[in-house]
Amino acid sequence: MDVDSGLSAAPLAEEAVLGLLLPFWQLVIGAFVLVVVVLSIGRLARRGPSRMTTALVVTAAAIAGFALVGVLLQG
């Protein structure tokens, strides 16, 4: 029987608890981001079509930039 078997169980238990909490925090953060995005889209839509077009172009550029960074860092 291995003496270290009791010592290695604690980190596994901590990782299991963190694994259970992680999806909850992702939902909380996602809900907060969704509320902020909806509120900002409403404000942007009230400002007019010109600002809306600029916002769409900036958003598309940001998405393309993040995708490019993701692809470059993946390899």
Image (cartoon, rainbow, N blue to C red):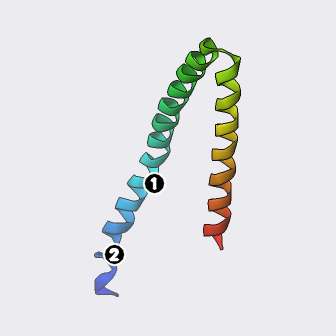
- Which amino acid lies under the numbered mark 1 shown in the image of this protein? Gly
Tell me if residue 73 comes above or below residue 21 in the rendering: below
Element class at badge 1: helix
Select label 2 or label 1 by which is in front. Answer: 1
Q: Residue at x 66, y 15 (%)?
A: 48
Q: Position of residue 18 (x, y in %)?
A: 40, 54
User: Most extreme residue toward the top, as rendered?
Assistant: 46
- Point out the tag, 2 or 1, that comes first from the N-terminus: 2
**Disc number placed over residue 51 in the picture, else none:** none
Where is the C terminus found, in terms of image quarters? bottom right
Q: Position of residue 42 (x, y in %)?
A: 59, 16
Q: Residue at x 69, y 32 (%)?
A: 56
- Foreground of the two, 53 or 34: 53
Tell me if residue 12 comes above or below residue 1 in the rendering: above
- Which amino acid lies under the numbered mark 2 shown in the image of this protein? Ser
Identify the residue position indicated by label 1 in the image: 19
Tell me if residue 26 comes above or below residue 4 in the rendering: above
Left or right of 55 in this view: 23:
left
At label 2, counting other C-alpha atoms closer than 10 Å, the crowd grade (few under 14, some 14-19, many 20 or more) is: few
- Foreground of the two, 10 or 37: 37
In the figure, residue 4 lies in which quadrant?
A: bottom left
**Disc number placed over residue 8 in the picture, else none:** 2
User: Most extreme residue toward the front, as rendered?
Assistant: 50
Element class at badge 2: loop
Q: Residue at x 45, y 54 (%)?
A: 19
Where is the N terminus found, in terms of image quarters? bottom left
- Foreground of the two, 45 or 18: 45
In the figure, residue 8 lies in which quadrant?
A: bottom left
Q: Position of residue 15 (x, y in %)?
A: 40, 61
At label 1, counting other C-alpha atoms closer than 10 Å, the crowd grade (few under 14, some 14-19, many 20 or more) is: few
